[in-house]
Image: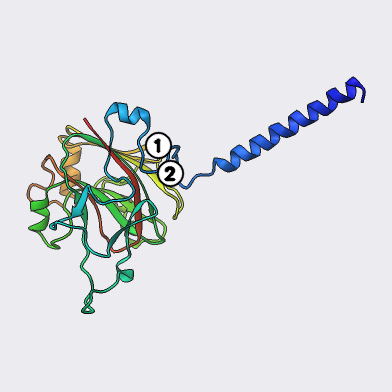
Amino acid sequence: MPRDNWTTVSRFLIAGLGLMITIASGCSGTRSSVGSSTAPNTLTPEEQNDGWELLFDGVSFDAWRGLGRDDIPDGHWVIEDGTIRKVASGDVATAADGQPLEGGDILTVETFDDFELSFEWKVAPGANSGIKYNVSEAMSTSSPPEYAALGFEYQILDDDRHPDALNGPTRTAGALYDMIPPNGNKRLAPVGVFNQSRLVFVGNRGEHWLNGELVVRYDLESARFDSLLEQSKYRDIDGFADRRRGHIVLQDHGDDVWFRSIKIHRQ
């Protein structure tokens, strides 16, 4: 074949190879979470160097126990495919005597002061849950219901299907529950896809991040925060908003929810 023809063929081959690589890259780039680029439940070398710690390793509840308990509420919380799953209460098996197994929130064994928390979560259609922080176990167990935590809450919700969203934007995903709604930067992944969240709690400053966007910011000592607390469901709970070294809690709201890649950086 003449040299010019070889040149033409070579160009077509190179162009075709480039197209195949582009298509393959696009397919391999499909992810099960928004903004995720590392394997679940692992620390990058940079995170390790910066002092991040895993609160869930994908296989054990070692860093967790039930609120007001020494163990995990049987049947209600399970490890499934590298996630912590809150099993919908209606799907939990009964005890040997036929009685329903009692659920409840789970909390970190350790307490934390200043920290940044990173985690991924997804919900079943119509599900509700939350991550609570600044939690006093003694305060929580002394107020009914016994196994539900009292604390600031990063709201987790199917905004389109759960009726709590109809009670206002302070009840929607990413909100500081019943106090501060997420702002217009909010981008929520479809139900069934993992969202990536960050929670910053340092000094009197709090921040909620959702899929790479800052959606809530507050100052515990501001007049605005005092006003919002006074308008919230927590206004009559003595000491609720006191800054403390507290537990981090995964909420049992009775619905199917999955958590993974829960990691913390102490400040």
Q: Position of residue 196 (x, y in %)?
A: 38, 43
For mark 1, what is the residue? 212
Quadrant location, the C terminus:
top left
Mark earlier in primary sequence (2, 1)? 2
Q: Residue at x 17, y 32 (%)?
A: 203
Q: Residue at x 17, y 34 (%)?
A: 204
Marking on residue 145? none
Question: Alpha-carbon distance for marks 2 and 1?
Answer: 9 Å
Give the structural element (helix, strand or loop) at label 2.
Answer: loop
Q: Mark 1: few, some, or many residues within 10 Å (few <14, many ≥20)?
A: some
Residue 216 image-quadrant placement = top left
For mark 2, what is the residue? 187
Q: Please report contact status of discs 2 and 1: CB closer than 8 Å, yes or no.
A: yes
Q: Position of residue 242 (x, y in %)?
A: 10, 42
Q: Position of residue 231 (x, y in %)?
A: 18, 50
Along the viewing direction, whichever of 102 and 179 lies nearer the viewer: 102
Q: Residue at x 89, y 20 (%)?
A: 3
Q: Position of residue 264 (x, y in %)?
A: 26, 37
Along the viewing direction, whichever of 2 and 125 lies nearer the viewer: 2
Q: Residue at x 74, y 34 (%)?
A: 16
Amino acid on which the number 2 mark rests in the picture: Arg
Along the viewing direction, whichever of 33 and 243 lies nearer the viewer: 33
The colour mode here is: rainbow
User: Seen in the image, is 67 located left or right of residue 161?
Assistant: left
Along the viewing direction, whichever of 16 and 3 lies nearer the viewer: 3
Residue 43 image-quadrant placement = top left
